[in-house]
Amino acid sequence: MNGARLALVLLAATSFLPAQDLKEFEKRVTEFTLANGLHFTVVERHDAPVASFHTFVNAGSADDPAGETGLAHMFEHMAFKGTESIGTRNWAAEKKALQTVEDVYDRIDAERNKGPKADQSKIDYLGMQLKEAIDVAQSYVESDEYTRIIEENGGVDLNADTSFDYTEYFCSLPSNRIELWFLLESQRFLHPVFREFYKERDVVQEENRLRNQPGSSGELWRDFVASAFEAFPYRNPPGGWPSDVDSLRRGMAQEFFEKYYVPANINIAIVGDVDPAQTRRLAERYFGPMPARPLPPLIHTVEPVQDGPKTAIVESRNQPLFAAGFKRPDQYDKDDPVYEVIALILASGRTGLLYTGLVQQKKIVKASGRDTGDAMKLSRDKITDISHKLIVMLKKSRDLRFKKDQNDARLDIVKAFTEILQVEEKADRAARDKVRSIKRDIAEGSEEWDILQKRYYSEELKKYGIDTSK
Ligand SMILES: [Zn+2]
């Protein structure tokens, strides 16, 4: 299902190995699928007695049900809360206490759902009861036991991440602890207990608050994506909208789990000092009991065609940030690799065109990035100039859409981008030469120099059909 992404992960791992060709690598790769549909990829690397585990679930925030944004992410947090035997002091009593919490919460929701006719004093009273019920349930919790077991057994890098399209869980352990990993990982997806749900919901809300502080890059990024997508659920932040998160219930996480955490929707990669035959035996033993269930439904929402550039502006006293984005087809599109290459050429680290052009040569931005949530950091006085140029480019790309061959159109967009960077550079150089030829003695960077340079710079740009005064 997620073969393309998995391949990228594995290739990245091999790139650290010297002089290794693809054939050699393939020899050490074993793949198998259990009867229930769960797929395993095992890569032998016996350099060190370590094994790394990566569980990849083909469900992310784009799969959050309407009104329940942030649910995939909430589930990710829940996956670390343990099982019926890990993380509890007394499962039987805890189970009852957890049910009481839900019963009280049901009564709160029933009252709230009356809308304007809801009795606030009743809600407040039930709210107090809810707090008490949560405290009782909490008294049975052995906090962080799951994490502690992994760490006590030499585990490192234990973490997880929820993206738009997928959720991933990973850690590394000494290779003599492989069976322990199989036990823990299978149990949390066979018998998960969503304990401390409402406590964790507060944690998640705090994460969201910190990420989206007014005027922060997080807020800009959130608004940027939300304005780019009108219909497709990418418009919702992976952490969810605060009011949705506030209303998330434990039962919703259970439903999400049952729908999306089905074996055929999960890929597990194991890399390291492992024996593929033994790995397969352990996989059968521990993950075999996961019942096969139908694959979850695909998202059928199609984003309407965008008819022109859209802009999102966030007022901020912080350093100016600028982000520009283009929509691309999904990972199954035959041209998906083309887009990857375009992104690499434009914005891959310190060799990308954006970095060399805008950061190193022009020094007009402090950093550039792509795809990862990193926005370009622009110096304040250049932000207008750049946005004008990009609008010109966006207009060009709009015309390009009507061309027949999509590949041509894409290459033209890259060309247009590159051209604008080159034009910008030429105009800047010409403007500098002009200032120097007229005023030999003024220092570069002085106020007078800047004023002259700016004037000549926009004159030069006009020669290329770019008017920054408009
Ligand atoms: Zn989180």
Image (cartoon, grey):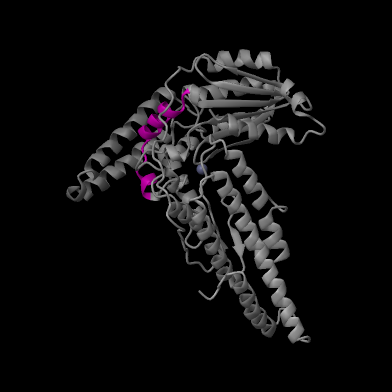
Magenta highlight: main SS: helix
Residue 256 visible in rendering = yes
Taking the spot 20% from the left edge, 47% from the top edge, the residue there is: 118
Residue 63: image location, x then y, percent: 43, 37
Q: Residue furthest front?
A: 404
Observer-nearest of 366 and 227: 227
- Residue 126 colored magenta? no
Residue 435: image location, x then y, percent: 72, 82
Observer-nearest of 223 and 1: 1
Taking the spot 61% from the left edge, 53% from the top edge, the residue there is: 414
Query: In this picture, is 383 found above or below 126?
Result: below
110 on left or right of 229: left
Residue 37: image location, x then y, percent: 51, 19
410 on left or right of 235: right
Give the extent of the magenta segment: 243-262
Q: Residue furthest left?
A: 117
The number of discs equals: 0
Taking the spot 53% from the left edge, 20% from the top edge, the residue there is: 38
Q: Quadrant of residue 452?
A: bottom right
242 on left or right of 373: left
Residue 394: image location, x then y, percent: 52, 59
Observer-nearest of 147 and 57: 57
Query: In this picture, is 154 found above or below 434?
Result: above
Observer-nearest of 450 and 72: 450
